[in-house]
Image: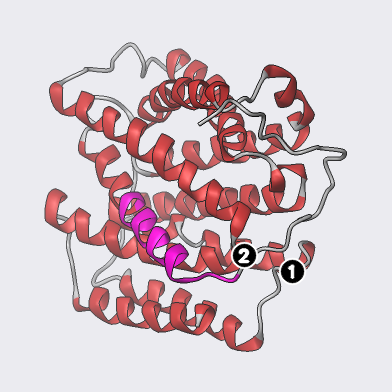
Amino acid sequence: MSNQRVVSNPHSDCIIGRAQRKTVDATAASLMLLFCLVLGFQQVAIKGVAEDISPMVQMALRSIMAVCLVGGLAYWRGIRWADVGHHWSPGLLVGLGFAAEFAFIAWGLTYTLASHMSVFLYTAPIFAALGLHLWVPGEQLSIRQWWGVGLAFLGMVIAMAPSGAYSIEIVIGDALGLLAGLSWAATTVVIRRTSLSEAPAELTLSYQLSVTALLLLPVAAISGQLMSAQFTPMAIASLGFQTLIISFAALLLWFTLLRRYRASQLGVFSFLAPLFGILFGTLLLNEPLSINFVIGGGVILVGIILVTR
């Protein structure tokens, strides 16, 4: 591959989707299934080593390491510092939204179950679909597709329906997970509405990771969480997985798909991630699993079919 420059010509931070996005096809659906499978394991990987390294420190360290990888890839593909300045305004907004999402996840996991965090984080497709419908031409859903989104959301609610009383700590953690989902949705809308819509995936991801690292690492250091981190073999393995697979490979895949396909249709696949999160939480962390999981999963799949068929 040559080092030919791949950055599009950015004239404004208010550019709305220059290229018409394709409807989700079998290739996109397969890649989104893989993406959701990986993200479903994210909360388990974080919570599994939380006693060694706090979630906040994990988020900060993986962002630092991943941005180095993304920066190297971007340079190899011909992206230079001058290109970064062309998109700095929406890039900053996306970075702040990403940092907020990570902070809410890290904070919420100290209160709630990994399976719950998976569910509430992936309310993001609902918020994103509403924002895209209102502000991004070409991303509107039909009435049938809105029914599909509603069914998928209902399935998610069924999948996490309580089998007993929740403590106030669980409720707080779930609320923080909801805020994380809102933050993720905001980044999707900003990307599709601004010049980042046509920017290379590496550039968009570098904004997100850089701002996240710059914000979360000082917070982790000031709070004492960084100094108390214990880098056990399991913690190192978890950080390696989060860096290489989630923050680098999976997020690059997500931003690449956003440049080619309709974000409102891609987003509905994210409802599968909580199911994987619940499944992994049950298998690896011995978290509870009920019949609601099976029923809710079936309803989510019906909703996805309505949106994408």
Most distant residue in the top direction: 227
Where in the figure is residue 204, as x and y percent of width and height?
61, 37
Q: Which residue is label 1 attached to?
A: 138
Q: Check disc 1 and give the amino acid type.
A: Gly
Instruction: Between residue 44 and residue 251, name the one nearer to us.
Output: 251
Most distant residue in the front direction: 2
Where in the figure is residue 42, as x and y percent of width and height?
32, 45
The verdict on residue 33 being magenta is yes
- Magenta part of the chain: 23-39
Instruction: Between residue 208 and residue 54, name the one nearer to us.
Output: 208
Where in the figure is residue 293, as x and y percent of width and height?
25, 73
Q: Residue at x 44, y 24 (%)?
A: 69
What whole-number distance in Å separates the C-alpha atoms at marks 2 and 1?
8 Å
Q: Is residue 247 left or right of residue 99?
A: left
**What label does residue 262 carry, if any?**
2
Q: Of callouts 2 and 1, which one flags the residue occurring earlier in the amino acid sequence?
A: 1
**Is residue 113 visible to the viewer in this orientation of the structure?**
no
Q: Residue at x 72, y 69 (%)?
A: 133
Q: Residue at x 25, y 46 (%)?
A: 44
Where in the figure is residue 219, as x and y percent of width and height?
50, 20
The verdict on residue 295 being magenta is no
Tell me if residue 40 comes above or below residue 73 in the rendering: below
Instruction: Between residue 194 and residue 282, name the one nearer to us.
Output: 194
**What label does residue 195 carry, if any?**
none
